[in-house]
Image (cartoon, helix red, strand yellow):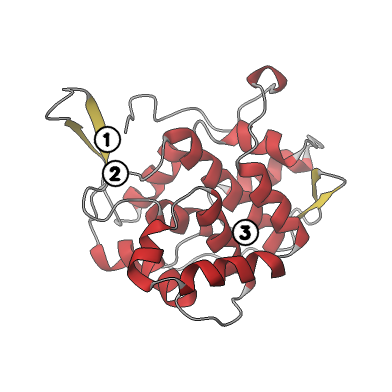
Amino acid sequence: MRRARTPTELTLTEEFFLVALDDSTGRPMVGRDLLGAGLAGTAIATLILAGRAEVRDGLLVPVDGQPLGDPVADPLLAELRLEQRQPVPDWIALMRPGLPGVVAEDLETLGVLRTEQVRHPVTRRMTTRFPAMDPVRAVGPRVRLGHALGRVVPLDARTAALAQIVRATGTEGWFVTMYGPTVRRQLTATASRLDPQLTAVVDAINHPVPRSRLAVRLWPQRDTSIAW
């Protein structure tokens, strides 16, 4: 049965978006393509963790069509049910252009952050930042992940997936600075224990595919004006 999420509950994709933001500037710490790839990876990981999809012979295939109540993972699940079976890197490339704008809108609707267009003082280019509207909820995912990575203890599957996607997108530096070298040891240990299906997703984040191979885009690119 589909479970409605509570007003304070965040999806794995929303948590990654917040972790990828710079606390002081509200800007993403990586470029839009890599941010989108990380968001796409968390959406796929969500389906795998929930038993809705699996990686079989390199292809992402549906297992259970019941929606999760997740605004990003559910559209992907619907596409999988239409037998659009493609390699994991292809799905990531399909989803990544539009996801930053989609997830930012979701978080703004939830009252977690807002989107601001500002002009860079030097380049004079318009850039986008996402200052917190609810600072406690905005920093929650970063604090929880930091506490998990700061100790050498086994992580639950959801936290382990988020940690490895953070590592794949190069956004782990803040955690190393705040929590010390234990973070790198924990990330290495977690990678060795990660479910092989989730490992396939993490590996696909940094392996883009040619746009010519992609026939459809799941989400319209709502963030064409976003630059950082």
Q: Nearer the viewer, mark 1 or mark 3?
A: 1
- Nearest to N terminus: mark 1 or mark 3: 3
Residue neighbourhood size for the residue with mark 2, other residues' Cα within 10 Å, grouped as few (<14), some (14–19), many (≥20): many
- Number of the front mark, 1 or 2: 2
Question: Residue 144, how many percent across, how many down?
Answer: 42, 73
Q: Rate crowding at label 1 as few (under 14), some (14 to 19) or many (20 or more) other CA atoms within 10 Å.
A: many
How far, Cα to Cα, is label 1 from label 2? 7 Å
Mark 2 — residue?
Answer: 27
Helix, strand or loop for disc 2: loop
Q: Residue at x 72, y 41 (%)?
A: 88
Q: Which tag is nearer the camera, tag 3 or tag 2? A: 2
Estimate the spatial distance between the alpha carbons at disc 1 and disc 3, rounded to whole Å. Answer: 30 Å
Q: Write down the quadrant of residue 89 in the picture.
A: top right
Nearer the N terminus, badge 1 or badge 2? 2
Q: Are marks 1 and 2 in contact (CB under 8 Å)?
A: yes
Identify which amino acid the numbered label 1 is placed on: Thr
Residue that appears at 52% across and 59% down: 12
Which of the pair 156/215 is nearer the observer?
156
Provide the residue designation for mark 3. 68
Tell me what residue is drawn at x 58 percent, y 59 percent.
164
In this picture, residue 18 sits left or right of residue 39 = left
Residue furthest right in the image: 57
| Extreme residue toward the left, this view | 121
For the question of whether residue 67 can be seen, the reply is: no
Image coordinates of residue 70 in percent, x first then y, are: 55, 54
Residue 137 pos. (x, y %): 32, 66
- Residue type at tag 3: Leu
Task: Identify the amino acid type marked 2.
Answer: Arg
Q: Which residue is mark 1?
A: 128
